[in-house]
Amino acid sequence: MEKKFIVKEAKKLEATLDHVIHAHYAASRLFRSLYLWLGIITIVLSTIVGIAVSFKVDGVNTISDNNPWLITILSGIIALFSGIMTFMSPNDRAIMNLTSGNEYDDLKNKVRIFWYVECNKNVSNDELLKRLQYLTEQKGKIKSYAPQIPILAYKMAKINARKIEYTRDFTKN
């Protein structure tokens, strides 16, 4: 195989990794935001319920005595958000996606160095092909344990990629 085809394949691998990196980073931001918003809302609602149960309005009755439905609804929302936080573990998912994004980014840098530096050295095509296959296998290894990217994060990354391409095209002219 000619060196130019090896470089072309390496550049394709780099472009693929770039999309995957952005998608994992978008997923990490999405889950981190979900974690923060659910946590903040749960804290605020829990505080309101605590005050409503203990605060005496007229010296005898509490807010919950006068409006038991309010406490029931707020308690249900708190339970729902707490359940989502427990079973979905958005903070853990954010960390896993960030870690995967960083690992893919590290691999992308190795691929770029491969096609930009190693392919310009006096190295046989067979050695370059072996190195390219190794880098491709590394991508497969990371993919085997990386979390699946949610469709919303994928779409966010795709939109971001279009903005980056538009900016690059605009700055070229």
Image (tube, helix red, strand yellow):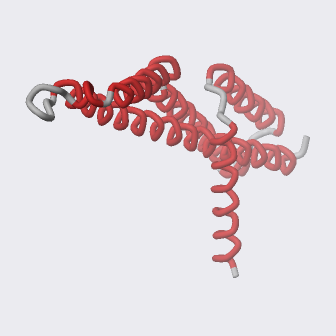
Percent x, y for residue 127?
77, 33
x 64%, y 70%: residue: 167
Compared to residue 118, the image places residue 86 above or below, namely above
**What residue is drawn where x is 72% and y is 48%?**
15
Q: Can you say whether 53 is above or below 2 in the image?
A: above
Can the viewer see residue 167? yes
- The image quadrant of residue 49 is top left
Q: Percent position (x, y) of residue 79? A: 42, 21
Is residue 169 shown left or right of residue 91?
right
The C terminus appears in which quarter of the rendering? bottom right
Image x and y of residue 131, in percent:
73, 32
Please state, as top left, top right, bottom left or bottom right, where the N terminus lies in the image: top right
- The answer to which image quadrant residue 163 occupies is bottom right
Q: Residue furthest left?
A: 59
Whether residue 118 is visible, yes or no, is no
Q: Image quarter for residue 91?
A: top left
* Residue at 48% in and 37% down: 34
The foreground one among 159 and 144 is 159
At 70% from the left and 45% from the top, the residue drawn is 14
Q: Position of residue 134 (x, y in %)?
A: 72, 28
Q: Nearer the viewer, residue 4 or 109?
A: 109
- Judged left or right of residue 135, residue 110 is left
Please name whichever residue, 115 or 148, is drawn nearer the observer in this view of the structure: 148
- Relative depth, front residue between 101 and 33: 33
Extreme residue toward the right, this view: 1
Q: How many marks?
A: 0
